[in-house]
Image (cartoon, helix red, strand yellow):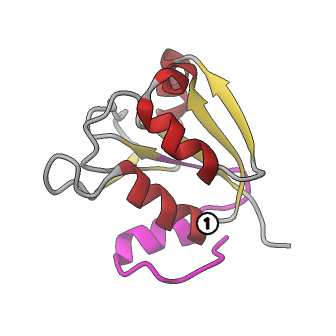
Amino acid sequence: MLQDRRILNPRLLAMLAGAGHTDTIVIADSGLPIAPGVEVLDLSLTPGVPSFLQTFDVVRETLAVERMILAKETEGQPLYRQLEPRLGTVRVEMVSHEEFKRLAARAKGVIRTGECTPYANIALVAGVTF
């Protein structure tokens, strides 16, 4: 369910609008393996463009999110310090990177960014606006 409509990319907007309650959308760095059959929206242009955080900020403002899932390995990365204040009050679950990849293989969609930072991946579980 959408909360905001500032996204210009029609495929990204359609992916987010199509996410029903409990569907998972993954925002991924440029290196996350993506399973066959999972819808991929590749926004990567050059290394770092768009960045993981730029993409997260826009998607987070647009999609109603009930929980987020990160790899435990993310916590030790500099990117996590920038991400942590953006998480807000939404419940965050930490799983191993291997479990994260298995979860991503069952996602409704993956948004690939140009991010080249290790473990710059997050799974957003869609919520509702009511």
Quick check: 110 left or right of 71? Answer: left
The magenta segment: 1-26
Kind of element beneath mark 1: loop
39 lies above or below 31? below
The quarter holding residue 84 reads top right
Q: Residue at x 46, y 26 (%)?
A: 101
Q: Is residue 106 above or below residue 15?
A: above
- Bin the neighbour count of mark 1 within 10 Å (Cα to Cα): few under 14, some 14-19, many 20 and up: many
Residue drawn at (40%, 68%) of the image: 12
User: Which quadrant: the C terminus?
Assistant: bottom right
Residue 40: x %, y % from top left? 34, 51
> In this view of the protein, which residue sits in the foreground, 70 or 40?
70
Residue 26 relative to residue 23: left or right: left
**Which amino acid type is marked by label 1?**
Leu
Vertical arrangement, residue 38 with respect to residue 1, above or below: above
- In x, y percent, where is residue 83? 53, 45
